[in-house]
Image (cartoon, rainbow, N blue to C red):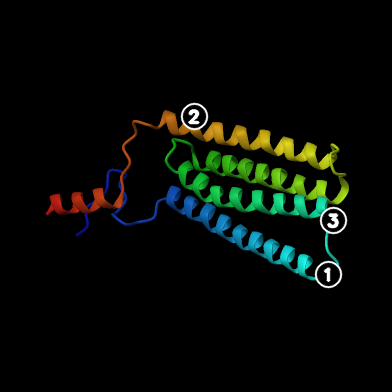
Amino acid sequence: MKSESESGQPPGSETGATNLQNVFSAISWTLLVAVMFGGYSLLRLLNSGDGLTDHEEQFFRAGHGHAGVLATLGILYGGALGRTRLSSSRQVAAWLVYLFGVALMSGGLFVHMAVGEAGEVSIGTTITTIGGVVLAVAVLFLAWHLFRARNDRQVDSSDRVHQEGDAR
């Protein structure tokens, strides 16, 4: 018979928080596929001969690069939320704010590519700036809640194995 962890769950069972972190990760990994498609699209545009202006290429690359890095960091962000004391609904809200910031940051670069002029401010640069502020708030929110949970005991699989061995 399996012993129960401190949370009252059988060892190895999925908790609501773990399921939530898996959902965040699955969505982030899927977004990375979209970013990879964007890289393929850029490559096709560059090789087609139709080409992009230097301005368009610069901001396509910037939007694509930011989307890739921030989507990858979204995997870490979602996992870190699970180590806070936040309720599931607040974790979802925090992750959605982060995702919104990513969309604004990288999307603003694509908007500037389409409607902006080299060396000029546009609605795209404004959107990118707002995205940066949203991301900063989301990251500082996470950092604060990780700090608040710094002394909480985390039960991991090695603790469960050790507890099972002690129970016998």
**Residue located beneath label 3 in the image:** 53
Crowding around mark 1 (Cα neighbors within 10 Å: few <14, some 14 to 19, many 20+) is few
* Residue 116, image x, y percentages: 86, 45
Give the alpha-carbon distance from disc 3 to disc 2, as whole Å: 43 Å
Helix, strand or loop at mark 2:
helix
Q: Is residue 98 above or below residue 9?
A: above
Query: What residue do we see at 69% from left, 54% from top?
Result: 64
Asked whether 3 or 85 is in front, the reply is 85
Crowding around mark 2 (Cα neighbors within 10 Å: few <14, some 14 to 19, many 20+) is few
* Residue type at tag 2: Trp
* Total numbered labels: 3
Query: What residue do we see at 83% from left, 69% from top?
Result: 49
Horizontal side, residue 45 vs residue 8: left or right: right
Helix, strand or loop at mark 3:
loop
Location of the C terminus (image quadrant):
bottom left
**Residue located beneath label 1 in the image:** 49
Give the alpha-carbon distance from disc 3 to disc 1, as whole Å: 12 Å
Quarter of the view holding residue 146: top left
Cβ–Cβ under 8 Å for marks 3 and 2: no
Give the alpha-carbon distance from disc 1 to disc 2, as whole Å: 50 Å
**Residue located beneath label 2 in the image:** 144
